[in-house]
Amino acid sequence: MFVDTLAEIALEWFNTILSSSINSFAKFKRVFLERFSANRAKPVEMADMFDIRQYAEESLKQFLNRFTNTSMRVVDPNEGLLVKALVKGLRASSFGESLYQIPPKTLVEIRQRAAVEIETEEAMRHKKAGDKRALTHTKIERDTKTFRRERTPLGLGRIAGSSLM
């Protein structure tokens, strides 16, 4: 029955165990944990939260999600310290400045204040993407028109007309 709960690597490992090498569940548990305990996520200490920084190309939304996901693994979380760690980890921005000017008390407050900034970031990202597409499209049109102009016989007509006179 227990074997049915194992998947992939754990099942492969289980199938390599010699039948006479483990004679109790306690021994199996010890051997299993020795083999697979390295795969467990290590608990996060409060001090580790102060090392989390917003990457240069990371949006505020992505940073908040990463920070929140990591904070969920903190052994003994302290809301006030988490707030300070999050503010410290933000990249320099108007949002970060606003948090220094009016310090938040909770992570919920930060998320509420960040909602407007995130909406603005996403709108600007979409606008930039649209502008890039429009610029690319305009450049293609411009290049096509230039190419067509170069092929028109206007220049040749002037040369032909001037040689006749």
Image (cartoon, grey):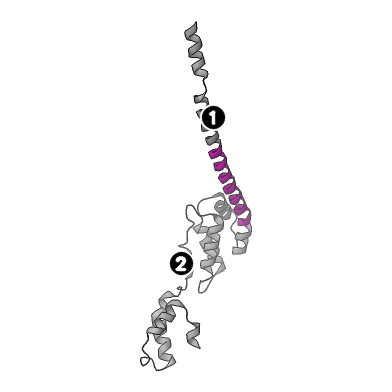
Element type at mark 2: helix
Q: Which residue is mark 2?
A: 48
Locate residue 113, reporting x and y percent: 62, 56
Residue located at (43% from left, 87% from top): 29
Q: CA distance from mark 1 to mark 2?
A: 58 Å
Q: Which residue is mark 1?
A: 145
Residue located at (61% from left, 60% from top): 111
State which quadrant residue 106 falls in: bottom right
Locate residue 120, reporting x and y percent: 61, 50
Amino acid type, callout 1: Lys
Per the rendered image, the range of residues in magenta is 113-137
Locate residue 44, reporting x and y percent: 47, 71
| Of the image marks 1 and 2, the number of the one nearer the N terminus | 2
In the depicted view, which residue is nearer to us: 138 or 48? 138
In the depicted view, which residue is nearer to us: 9 or 36? 9
Q: Residues within 10 Å of mark 2 (few under 14, many from 20)?
A: few
Locate residue 105, reporting x and y percent: 60, 62
Which mark is on residue 96?
none
Asked if 23 appears above or below 141 in the picture, the reply is below
Q: Is residue 106 visible?
A: no
Amino acid type, callout 2: Asp
Specify whether residue 136 is painted magenta. yes
Q: Is residue 13 visible?
A: yes
Residue located at (55% from left, 53% from top): 96
Element type at mark 1: helix
Q: Main secondary structure of the magenta part?
A: helix
Q: Residues within 10 Å of mark 1 (few under 14, many from 20)?
A: few
Q: Horizontal placement of 108 versus 153: left or right?
A: right
